[in-house]
Image (cartoon, coloured by chain):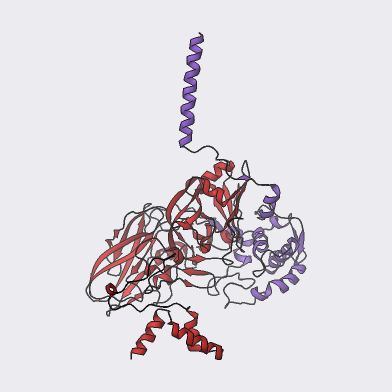
Chain colours: A red, B purple
Amino acid sequence: MKVQKKDKQVIKSNKISRRTLLAGMVAAAVLPVNPIFAKHVQTGPHTVPEPPEDPTKTIGPGPSAQGKRSTFEHPIRKFSETSSRSPLQDFHSTITPSDLHYERHHAGVPIIDPQKYELLIHGMVERPMKFTLAELKRFPAVSRICFLECAGNFRGGKEELTPQEILGLTSQSEWTGVMLSTLFREVGADPKALWFLAEGSDAAVMTRSVPVKKAWDDAMIVYAQNGEAIRPEQGYPVRLLLPGWEGNMNIKWLRRIELSDEPYMTREETSKYTYPVKDRIRMFSFEMDARSIITFPSYPQKIMPGWVEIRGIAWSGRGKIEKVEVSTDAGKTWQDARLQDPVLSKAHTYFRHLWQWNGNPTEILSRAVDETGYVQPTLQQLAEARGTAMGGYHMNPITSWQIKTDGSTLFKPE
Amino acid sequence: MKIKIVVGTALLGLILFHQVSAQQTSYPSRFGFGRLATTTEIALWDIDVRPDGKGLPAGQGDVLKGKVIYTSKCMACHGNNDTDLSKIKLPAPLLVSDTLAKSRPKAIGNYWPYATTLFDYIRRTMPYNQPGSLTDNEVYSITAYLLYANKIIKQNQFLNAKTLPGIVMPAKKLFIMDDRKGGPEVR
């Protein structure tokens, strides 16, 4: 019984004891395929210290060069070949730990030597120029907290979906870098330039056309994320940051900006990241529309009758979240949720709403309202406005959780 | 008279000094960081192509050559003609692009508004396992083959920097710019 319990614990925490590991290595040396040990070895040779009965009676480990999460916490990204999703249900506030930021790559994560890195700005400018990473860091720096979200961020279709699986292609960081307008002044941007092309140095040589007005507004060239150098998956050493605009335009591993009087009509802005609207195809949808999701309670969590604090995040690419409304009766009535200060423009905003659950089955929903007066629509409203073949880009419908009699929570697919 | 000039000059000096100190606390027009890029450096990276043909290189390609190159370098992932490799997400069938099989096919013939985009995209990213390895002539030829396979050009049409921008794609008339500005209306 004790052994069984211990074994269960080992698997649950993705950890194995040194003894198990050694035994596994011996077995692996003898038998090329041993499914029991193969499962363990895949998770990595970490050790979980057995917690002492009374931590006040044992001296713990001292300081170390690099901190780690508690061995009892295992937030992970869910990943496919081309993307990974942030575990929204594991976050208690709005900054995404950098190692859990969502990813979307089109040809993998390139390795770029920061010593050799250069950013080229040319085209409709007085002086085509190149800037090293060190030179970019000499310019006046600015920090900004904002979300980044993939334009294809929404998945439904079944009840057993977590917030991570439904909407995990959004994350938030504090980004630091130089305003693009500062660099545009440095190169002498031609006032007649209307667009600029941003190009990455990954194997997709990713390109997007961006209106120059965004550069004079709030676009940034960033080299830091949450206080340290940007993660490789987020564009190390330098990426473009277009607050509030669809993730794909925020070109990672940025190597080149070319100013132009017209857009380039790259593949990503024509055959991708566009969507049918009735009998037309809509392109250049830059801003991410306001949306929200309840992250607690959510699948596969279970609640008990009594007080429940409903929690979640809301955000808009067009500015601040004005309010978030929560319904606990399947959309019949709505109450304003409390918003966590500070409410920042183009940023994930944490909301909370106290609810006394009486144990009856119901549905809980949230809808965001942004400072332009936009109200997060239902899927039906979107379908009426765009037609049923609207595709998967820029889909921001209200999402609903079903609360069952036993307190279990299931996504409501539509 | 002389005193007036001296006083005037001193005043002017004072004003200039004030302006300089004010400028020191605000942004200068230029910081002087970075260096001028050489034309060679720009040419090495400036590979983009616009719908008006700006950026298209010299060279030429044709449908038949394109079919041969496609068969050897593209078919393994993208399939042959309209053979649907729907189970594979990243590689895609030739005429259905890399979209999910369940959704409406977004193919070159019905969803790509500009022929120049084909050239630009193939040249910068393809083949997936050897990106950037195709010659300009090969890219012209593959572009020609794909346009022919989508019934947009004739089999005997050559593609080059002059002819490619002139091709009108069937989907072009469908594309509209997003003009939403927020506000209560759902669109």
Placement of B4 over or under B128, stated as above or below: above
Which residue is nearer to you in this view: A79 or B80? A79
Q: Which x, y percent locates residue A399?
A: 37, 68
Q: Which corner quadrant holds the C terminus of chain A?
A: bottom left
In the image, residue B136 lies at what x, y percent? 73, 60
Specify the quadrant of the image occupied by residue A365.
Answer: bottom left
**Left or right placement of residue A29 versus residue A92 in this view:** right
Q: Can residue B157 be seen from the camera position used here?
A: no
Foreground pick, B101 / A88: A88
Q: Quadrant of the N terminus of chain A?
A: bottom left
Quarter occupied by residue A356: bottom left
x and y percent of residue A262 in the render?
60, 49
Identify which residue, A315 or A89, lies in the foreground. A89
Residue A263 visible in the displayed image? yes
Measuring from the top left, give residue A122's x and y in whole percent.
Answer: 62, 47
The answer to whether residue A42 is above or below residue A349 is below
A335 with respect to A90 (left or right): left
Residue at coordinates 47% horizontally, 15% vertically from top-left? Answer: B7
